[in-house]
Image (spheres, grey):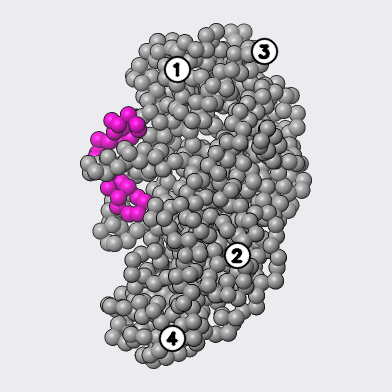
């Protein structure tokens, strides 16, 4: 070994350089710090080496710090010290030195030929702690391959019991090595189980360990990438920026003259949000009709609540990718570049060392993400999905458009909300114009506990609804006989500005084809996020200038998209969807009649020629039809929504955990939890629905950069993956497979498929392969 290498060892950094020629075949021949955790090839032909015991100590410190936020620091510290205990095994040390030198990915398991080092720490935890060791055994055994099932895995993966039994005989060889006492026999955890679900507690410990391991590995493997993380101002500074922005916005409104009725309501909602932010952490709701300023008012509540109660971050959960993009842009205009916008549409199905390091951990003061990303992460077994969970502790979570909570998963979703609130210090805000019915319900042979103690910020929903009523709803006398799209196009063509919202992508394309070519605009999730953003800017510009415009869109335009049309047509759907469509009509209350008096906008319900897609949309359509057939004086009153959601949810009875998630996570006395099976079943978007494709839409420089990365053998880093998200379209798996087979798309990197056929993306309507499965889908919820 060179003098320089000896000096690096003496420095106490836990990392040193060594040449290929000097690389010994066994750990016994390496003097000083003998055990290699990671190795990185340098440009000069040497390898930089990270020592096992130092890696374990650093990960233990990081994990303990993460888990201190929810009272599990002593458990996470032991998990950190034991997670790579198996790397002391001579077989692992021989493997990492094999052949031409160090393998940078040798520490990652799940690939044939690699040594299972994770399970040995799990075996040690069981031997030392007995049954309590199962808390750590799941965490340690799964820190590379994901949380396992205890037994009876449904997906063919090795269970915890199988792995423990297969590796138990190898542990004596590890313990015979020169492991420092503080690593092999540290102080054992003394804190007790905090309550709630043991499965969630294990996932939180798992998250703390995995994130610590990823970050320490990233520090060694790619220090530059590690420096990209965490460079954000504190919430206190963000709060000050927000106040300055709102003061400037208020001054701008006042400069235009007296407040309009709509702006008076918005100011009152904002005032109440700021006042009520001091209330104790827990479960809160904000029920405000569309156009009432929910987005900025809810952010005001979240920032003030976080300041008063010392919360660490704010996570905004939004159902549609289109609204994620819009909301993130609104927040950036108010706060600067402090927002992490996180979708899940570029996460590879098979993880690689680089994709693990590039995954998000939500270590930011303000995260805007999708419902799919948020809820699936809370039930995840995969490391890249679960690593963010510990950062939810002592945070504020705003559930925007709360009416979109998935009924088939409502029981496990609300179960985890209760635990996060009561055990992990998370304050929730259920934010919507159409608050769902989430209280306790009982059936003949089932019981749904629901949520208790939710505090409403603006309690008089009926008065607020009346104050913000700006539309007249027209419902056809016949709610069964459909209208053809050619006829509907003739009806709406004379309008100067009209928005028509349909339930299916093929409906949107068909109606678009019948509209006047010079004024028609199309919106659907077959357009990438960047394309949709540009289209929305074009629509707003046309509305402001008074030009003729006829927009046809799927339902992605409904929830939270800031558009203001005098006339809106809505295909028959659930009552909440009709109310959201009404929120795009006369949004500012500026319409006037011929005498200059305030006039309502028009919202027209019609029966489309095709039924809504099967599943929740079709059920909601059926319940919505029954509600409208009752012919109430105000079909969109808060009272009608309570009745609507009660029928929508409770007609399903015990199907609110349709896939049986909770029984899989039921711990019993022996913690026999089936993490992987539960994660496989908890899919808000079924695998058959969509896979991502990076489309070619005015992003030639980005495509060229990706091609250069591919040629050089590198993968996109974290900032590049965030940039890619704006150019992704999700398509059905069957269509995806067909396009891959024909060469129309190619997988350039794990999880990153790129459009190759230049004519597959239309400049006006987006991705356009001819398979009807692509166009018959609905834009219900996206990743």
Q: Is residue 449 visible?
A: yes
Asked if marks 3 and 1 touch (Cβ < 8 Å), the reply is: no
The residue singled out by tag 3 in the image is 633
User: Looking at the image, is 44 positioned above or below residue 534?
Assistant: below
The image shows residue 363 at horizontal and vertical percentages of: 55, 58
Tell me the magenta residue range: 745-774
Q: What is the C-alpha distance between the residues marked 3 and 1?
A: 24 Å
Q: Secondary structure at mark 4?
A: loop
The image shows residue 776 at horizontal and vertical percentages of: 38, 28
Quarter of the image for the N terminus: give it. Answer: bottom left
The residue singled out by tag 1 in the image is 608
- Of pointers 4 and 1, the one earlier in the residue sequence: 4
Q: Secondary structure at mark 1?
A: loop
Q: Residue at x 56, y 80 (%)?
A: 183
Disc 1 versus disc 2: nearer the observer: 2
Disc 4 versus disc 2: nearer the observer: 2
Q: What is the C-alpha distance between the residues marked 4 and 3?
A: 80 Å
- Mark drawn on residue 34: 4
Give left or right: position of 568 versus 106: right
Q: Residue at x 45, y 17 (%)?
A: 608
């Amino acid at each position: 070994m060179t003098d320089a290498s000896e000096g690096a060892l003496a420095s106490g950094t836990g990392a040193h350089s060594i040449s290929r020629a000097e690389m010994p075949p066994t750990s016994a021949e390496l003097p000083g710090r003998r055990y290699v955790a990671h190795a990185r090839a340098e440009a000069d032909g040497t390898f930089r080496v990270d020592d096992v015991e130092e890696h374990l100590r650093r990960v233990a410190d990081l994990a303990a710090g993460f888990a201190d936020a929810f009272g599990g620091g002593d458990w996470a510290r032991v998990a950190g010290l034991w997670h790579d205990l198996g790397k002391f095994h001579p077989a692992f040390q021989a493997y990492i030195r094999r052949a031409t030198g160090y393998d940078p990915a040798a520490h990652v398991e799940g690939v044939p030929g690699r040594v299972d080092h994770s399970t040995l720490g799990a075996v040690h935890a069981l031997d030392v702690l007995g049954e309590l060791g199962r808390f750590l055994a799941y965490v340690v055994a799964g820190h590379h391959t994901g949380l396992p099932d205890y037994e009876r895995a449904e997906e063919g993966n090795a269970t915890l019991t199988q792995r423990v039994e297969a590796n138990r005989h190898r542990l004596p060889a590890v313990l015979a090595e020169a492991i420092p006492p503080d690593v092999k026999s540290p102080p054992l955890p003394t804190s007790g189980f905090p309550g709630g679900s043991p499965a969630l507690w294990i996932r939180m410990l798992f998250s703390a360990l995995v994130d610590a391991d990823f970050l320490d590995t990233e520090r060694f493997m790619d220090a530059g990438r590690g420096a990209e993380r965490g460079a954000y101002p504190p919430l206190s500074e963000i709060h000050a920026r927000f106040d300055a922005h709102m003061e400037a916005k208020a001054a701008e409104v006042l400069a235009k003259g007296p407040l309009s009725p709509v702006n008076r309501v918005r100011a009152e909602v904002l005032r109440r949000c700021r006042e009520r932010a001091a209330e104790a952490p827990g479960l809160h709701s904000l029920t405000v009709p569309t156009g009432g300023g929910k987005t900025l008012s809810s952010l005001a509540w979240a920032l003030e609540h976080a300041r008063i109660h010392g919360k660490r971050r704010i996570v905004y959960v939004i159902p549609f990718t289109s609204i994620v993009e819009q909301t993130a842009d609104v927040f950036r205009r108010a706060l600067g570049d402090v927002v992490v916008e996180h979708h899940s549409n570029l996460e590879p199905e098979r993880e690689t060392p680089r994709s693990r390091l590039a995954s998000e951990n939500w270590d930011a003061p303000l995260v805007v993400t999708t419902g799919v990303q948020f809820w699936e992460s809370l039930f995840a077994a995969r490391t890249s999905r679960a690593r963010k969970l510990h950062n939810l502790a002592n945070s504020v979570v705003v559930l925007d458009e709360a009416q979109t909570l998935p009924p088939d998963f409502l029981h496990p979703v609300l179960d985890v909300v209760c635990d996060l609130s009561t055990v992990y210090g998370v304050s929730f805000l259920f934010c919507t114009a159409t608050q769902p019915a989430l209280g306790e319900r009982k059936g003949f042979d089932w019981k749904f506990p629901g949520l208790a103690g939710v505090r409403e910020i603006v309690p008089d929903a009926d008065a607020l609804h009346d104050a913000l009523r700006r539309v007249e709803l027209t419902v056809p006398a016949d709610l069964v006989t459909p209208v053809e799209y050619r006829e509907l196009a003739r009806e709406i063509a004379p309008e100067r500005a009209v928005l028509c919202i349909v339930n299916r992508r093929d409906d949107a394309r068909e109606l678009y084809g019948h509209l006047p070519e010079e004024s028609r605009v199309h919106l659907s999730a077959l357009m990438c996020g960047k394309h949709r953003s540009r289209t929305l800017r074009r629509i707003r510009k046309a509305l402001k200038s008074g030009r003729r415009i006829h927009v046809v869109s799927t339902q992605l335009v409904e929830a939270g998209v800031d558009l203001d049309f005098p006339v809106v047509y809505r295909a028959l759907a659930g009552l909440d969807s009709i109310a959201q469509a009404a929120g795009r009509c006369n949004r500012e209350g500026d319409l006037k009649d011929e005498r200059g008096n305030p006039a309502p906008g028009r919202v027209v319900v019609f029966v489309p020629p095709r039924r809504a897609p099967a599943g929740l949309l079709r059920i909601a359509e059926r319940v919505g039809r029954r509600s409208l057939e009752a012919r109430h004086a105000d079909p969109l009153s808060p009272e009608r929504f309570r009745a609507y959601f009660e029928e929508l949810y409770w007609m399903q009875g015990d199907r609110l955990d349709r896939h049986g998630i909770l029984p899989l996570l039921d711990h019993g006395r022996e913690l026999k939890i089936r993490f992987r099976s539960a994660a496989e079943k908890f899919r808000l978007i079924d695998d058959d629905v969509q896979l991502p494709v990076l489309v070619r839409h005015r992003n030639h420089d980005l495509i060229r950069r990706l091609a250069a990365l591919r040629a050089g053998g590198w993968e996109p880093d974290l900032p590049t993956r965030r940039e890619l998200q704006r150019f992704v379209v999700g398509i059905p798996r069957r269509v995806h497979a067909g396009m891959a087979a024909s060469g129309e798309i190619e997988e350039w990197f794990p999880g990153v498929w790129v459009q190759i056929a230049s004519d597959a993306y239309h400049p006006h309507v987006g991705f356009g392969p001819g398979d009807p499965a692509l166009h018959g889908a609905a834009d219900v919820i996206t990743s």
